[in-house]
Image (cartoon, rainbow, N blue to C red):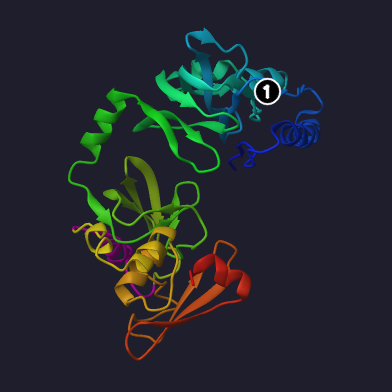
């Protein structure tokens, strides 16, 4: 199970929101850490400033990936999320629960040092598996906007080590992305001869199911993909240099895993076709949703192929899909071959379709 945190999303009224967040976090810390953690309230200064949050993702019980601000204009930042998390978890063995850290930085132009690094509460882990404690660090030039919330983001994977800054409300990248170029070179070699994902694929952790639940995180259609090998009812792949697995979970009686994967991996980039679709169709595909008037090809690109155990043939008048909460919905086709309607409860309909 992965445990992660991210900053509050409302940029207005910073102090009140931070205090609310800290209050909730304090209660959570007492529950998780037996009261051993200490919290503090960061007070907004009286000069124009921006709030920068660290972020973290627990990889397993004893290790977490931290993406932190480590210096501003060459001046080191003494406190960051990794340091606080390790202190807060002392005496708990391998257990490591990420703890958030934020700080105000004067608005204006700065050179920020960002670091992505694995941390552990058990120092012996560094000795037992030193190669797994990857790190990437570097400097970026940015101009921080007053009253804006930023987040240090990143990824630490075997073929991707990157860290960058984003605007929290929009997710927009700010400044350059810091990349481990040696690892990037390895990734380029590994992705040689890549094909493309036929459609939007949804995933949980590293698993992509043939249910392709609509509301899970999404890999856009046309993302480079390389087949690494097959296992029992699954395939190992690299998708944009990320190691992932594609599970043939439900349609095994109707098609082999090789046949299923052949549908997902295509030689022609679907983005070439997408850019020629009407703006409304492009909007639906970019969101991984469906709308009236789409063709079968367009629905496949946006929602993926329907499961073959529930939709026996693409010529059927109804295609069945699911959300991550296992809410069913139907795409209903008209005689003209276009989407006539989407059958779903109102609360589901808003999640899977656009007007």
| Residue appearing at x 37%, y 85% in the figure | 316
Residue 256 part of the magenta segment: yes
Left or right? Give the position of 153 relative to 236: right
| Residue appearing at x 21%, y 35% in the figure | 189
The image quadrant that residue 184 belongs to is top left
Residue 143 locus on image (x, y percent): 46, 25
Residue 99 in the image: above or below residue 219: above
Residue 212 in the image: above or below residue 109: below
Residue 220 locus on image (x, y percent): 36, 54
Residue 22 in the image: above or below residue 48: below
Left or right? Give the position of 323 relative to 253: right
Residue 262 part of the magenta segment: yes
Label 1 crowd (10 A; few <14 / some 14-19 / many >=20): few
* Part of the protein shown in magenta: 253-267
Residue 115 locus on image (x, y percent): 47, 21
| Residue appearing at x 64%, y 41% in the figure | 10
Asked whether residue 123 is in view, the answer is yes
Count of numbered circles in the view? 1
Left or right? Give the position of 343 relative to 246: right
The image quadrant that residue 1 belongs to is top right
Residue 41 locus on image (x, y percent): 75, 24
For disc 1, the marked residue is 93
- Could you say whether the residue bearing mark 1 is in a helix, strand or loop? loop
């Amino acid at each position: 199970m992965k445990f992660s945190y991210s900053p509050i999303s409302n940029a207005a009224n910073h102090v009140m929101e931070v205090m609310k967040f800290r209050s909730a976090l304090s209660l959570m810390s007492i529950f998780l850490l037996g009261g051993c953690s200490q919290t503090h309230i960061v007070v907004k200064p009286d000069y124009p400033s921006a709030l920068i949050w660290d972020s973290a993702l627990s990889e397993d019980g004893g290790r977490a990936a931290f993406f932190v601000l480590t210096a501003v204009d060459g001046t080191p930042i003494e406190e960051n999320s990794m340091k606080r998390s390790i202190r807060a978890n002392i005496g708990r063995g391998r257990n490591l629960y990420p703890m958030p850290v934020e700080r105000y930085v004067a608005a204006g132009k700065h050179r920020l040092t960002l670091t992505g690094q694995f941390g552990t509460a058990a120092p012996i882990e560094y000795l037992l598996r030193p190669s797994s404690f990857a790190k990437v660090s570097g400097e970026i030039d940015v101009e921080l906007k007053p009253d804006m919330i930023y987040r240090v983001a990143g990824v630490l994977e075997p073929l991707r080590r990157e860290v960058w800054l984003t605007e929290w409300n929009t997710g927009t990248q700010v400044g350059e992305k810091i990349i481990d170029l040696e690892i990037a070179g390895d990734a380029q070699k590994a992705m040689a001869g890549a094909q493309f994902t036929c459609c939007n694929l949804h995933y949980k952790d590293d698993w992509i199911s043939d249910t392709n639940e609509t509301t899970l995180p999404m890999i856009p259609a046309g993302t480079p993909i390389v087949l690494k090998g097959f296992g029992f009812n699954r395939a190992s792949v690299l998708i944009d240099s990320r190691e992932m697995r594609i599970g043939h979970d439900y349609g095994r009686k109707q098609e082999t895993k090789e046949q299923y994967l052949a549908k997902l991996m295509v030689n022609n980039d679907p983005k070439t076709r997408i850019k020629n679709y009407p703006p409304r169709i492009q909007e639906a595909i970019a969101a991984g949703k469906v709308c009236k008037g789409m063709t079968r090809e367009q629905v496949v690109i946006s929602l993926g192929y329907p499961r073959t155990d529930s939709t026996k043939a693409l010529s059927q008048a109804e295609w069945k899909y699911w959300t991550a909460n296992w809410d069913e919905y139907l795409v209903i086709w008209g005689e003209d071959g276009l989407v006539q309607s989407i059958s779903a409860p109102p609360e589901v309909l808003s999640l899977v379709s656009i007007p």
